[in-house]
Image (tube, grey):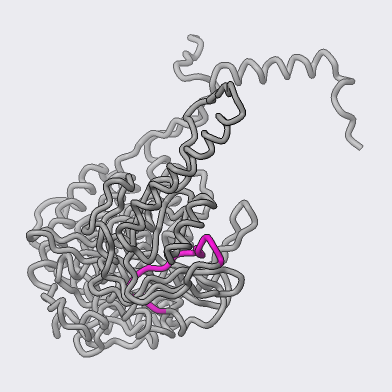
Amino acid sequence: MQAPMLVLNQNTKRESGRKVQLGNIKAAKTISDIIRTCLGPKAMLKMLMDPMGGIVMTNDGNAILREIQVQHPAAKSMIEISRTQDEEVGDGTTSVIILAGELLKVAEPFLVENMHPTVIIAAYRQALEDAVDIMRNEISVPVDTTNRTEMIKIIKSSLGTKFMKGWNDLACGIALDAVNCVHMDDAGRKEIDIKRYAKVEKVPGGSIEMSQILDGVMFNKDVTHTGMKRRIENPRIVMLDCNLEYKKGESQTNMEFMQETDFRKILQLEEEYIKTICDDIIAMKPDLVLTEKGISDLAQHFLLKAGISGIRRLRKSDMNRVARAVGGQIVHRTEELKESDVGTECGLFEIKKFGDEYFTFLTKCKNPKACTILLRGASKDVLMEVERNLQDAMNVARNVIMDPHLVPGGGAVEAALAHKLNEKSKAILGVGQWPYRALADALKIIPKTLMQNCGVNTIRTMTTLIAKHATEGTTWGVDGETGKIVDMKEFGVWDTFQVKAQVMKTAIETAILLLRIDDIVSGVKKQSDIDAEKMAGKFQQQNPEAAPAEE
């Protein structure tokens, strides 16, 4: 008998074929079950402890999965799609996981019956194309982005499932104003950079109702000298990113003095250098100087004498926001200062104190292209959750402005697609129509989960919903609060087309990717590690008494 031949390293673990596919499906289902209770207005919160002992309380799919440590490679790729969804459109992170899990679950019976994965994949691909097509051409409706009440309604439907829903009007107003503020239309090219120009400042204390959006910017700094003014109306602002102190040599600098007057001369040169810099600034007659670097004591003295307030060590990102809000340019050398570099569009500079911290406010700007959202709340955890919710709301507003099409919310679009794809599957010939139809059924998981989270009779309500879609059009969905079937057109819950299309694409493509895997090789160790383990084993055998005695 021939000895078995070893090709792979003995330390590797290999699984292949059906076992891997079913294992991947199981892993994906586990992840989607964790998230399932986080969908809809009746969503539960999850409380997670991170390794550092910090606590995260949230029902945002992406935030939960970011904190969970998983071992299985398929589960890792599921977590990855939630992150993709968050980065691309900022909403729908929970739906995408639930849908991907369900798509894999419905593929399981076909694999068990020995249908080849590529047949299932081909059917899924076809269904994805048809679904996006139907959504754009038959279900979506255009929206007027200049109509404020319409826009607030759309953002409300995203926030309705979040912690912030008690302060809906406040949050929606803040999100919409922030997005309109940073919206730039440059020769037909729209740019809405929320991350860079809409800063969220979290200040613990006060209540959530005290949160507001500023028509300008704020940052956590105080003036450098106590004698400087802390409130100036219509200030002229100079923004620098150079030192207002004597330049130190890059490397070590040695000086040799031949007589005692030389030392005085050097100090005088330093003072003159700083005076020159300050004179360049004072010549522009500013009221406020902001710099990214330091301001020396001497420079503070000169500025104070001229009645100028100075703030030092601002972050680069804060500086860019200030420049966008007050007009003017950030200058790199004081010699190059000119009138056009001075920011004159700010209406009020003042410093306020919250708790023990001082905050600088530059507000009442004429036409700010950057803004700060000031959040107040009881504790750090509350503020973190409110910030996550606001980010989602701003993303929704951005998506609508970028692509002004809406689809009905509350599971209506999924139920409509399920019905239409089911009808289409009848025209497909061959074995491919079964996975196609299974995908149509899998879409119903979204309305079904909404019902489950409300605690209504799922089967009866689902049957009613399917009947409505078969007879009365595409806008019927589930009211997430009560679990009743309502017409979303009248109920006023809408989702953005961009989010739904991205959910479909990401979920179906992930399901396809995981079905394609038929082999997992894991646990490949480095040779050096294996040798070290062997040595340790030998040492243990030679010196059994060296092993620590167990009590």
Q: Nearer the viewer, residue 179 or 88?
A: 179
Q: Does residue 24 lie above or below 211 as drawn? A: above
Residue 222 among magenta residues? yes
Answer with the quarter of the image where residue 484 lies: bottom left
Task: Please indicate, yes or no, whether residue 441 appears anywhere in the rendered image.
Answer: no
The boundaries of the magenta stretch are 212-226
Q: Nearer the viewer, residue 85 or 367?
A: 367
Residue furthest top as drawn? 2
Task: Please indicate, yes or no, whether residue 260 appears anywhere in the rendered image.
Answer: yes
Q: Nearer the viewer, residue 393 or 454?
A: 393
- Residue 380 pos. (x, y %): 56, 69
Q: Which residue is at 46% across, 85% downward? A: 209
- Residue 453 pos. (x, y %): 43, 77
Q: Nearer the viewer, residue 84 or 506?
A: 84
Answer with the quarter of the image where residue 21 lies: top left
- Residue 13 pos. (x, y %): 51, 30
